[in-house]
Amino acid sequence: MRLNSSDLKWAEYDDWSGTLTIGFHSGGVYEYYSVPAWQFSGLINAESHGRYFHQNIKGQYRYRRIRRTAMIEY
């Protein structure tokens, strides 16, 4: 899902694993693990996606930077 943010470009959520994947305008793609579905819902419905991410997700969940073989465009 495309996000309207100067920092975050897009986000995807896997209900089965609770993995939140976020692409940044800088080109980085990160996976955040064991994220509850309500956090993803909060992110996509937030007035400010970047603010929500920094206040509620960043630093709260285990994560890693991943590499994609193909760029995902939203």
Image (cartoon, rainbow, N blue to C red):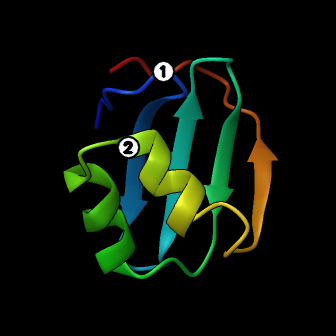
- Mark 2 residue type: His
* Residue 41 picture location, percent across and down: 25, 65
Relative to residue 7, is residue 52 depicted above or below? below
Mark with earlier residue (1, 2): 1
Which quadrant is the C terminus positioned in?
A: top left
Q: Which image quarter: residue 31?
A: bottom right
Q: Is residue 19 left or right of residue 33?
A: left
**What element does badge 2 sit on?**
helix
Which quadrant is the N terminus positioned in?
A: top left
Q: Residues within 10 Å of mark 1 (few under 14, many from 20)?
A: few
The residue to which callout 2 is attached is: 49
The residue to which callout 1 is attached is: 6
* Residue 69 picture location, percent across and down: 67, 25
Q: Give the alpha-carbon distance from disc 1 to disc 2, as whole Å.
A: 9 Å
Q: Is residue 42 left or right of residue 21?
A: left
Relative to residue 5, is residue 31 depicted above or below? below
Residue at 42%, 82% in the rendered image: 36
Q: Residues within 10 Å of mark 2 (few under 14, many from 20)?
A: many
The residue nearer to you, when weighing 37 against 42, is: 42
The residue nearer to you, when weighing 26 against 33, is: 26
Relative to residue 35, is residue 12 depicted above or below? above
Q: Where residue 22 is drawn, which disc sits there?
A: none
* Residue 50 picture location, percent across and down: 47, 41
Residue at 66%, 60% in the rendered image: 58
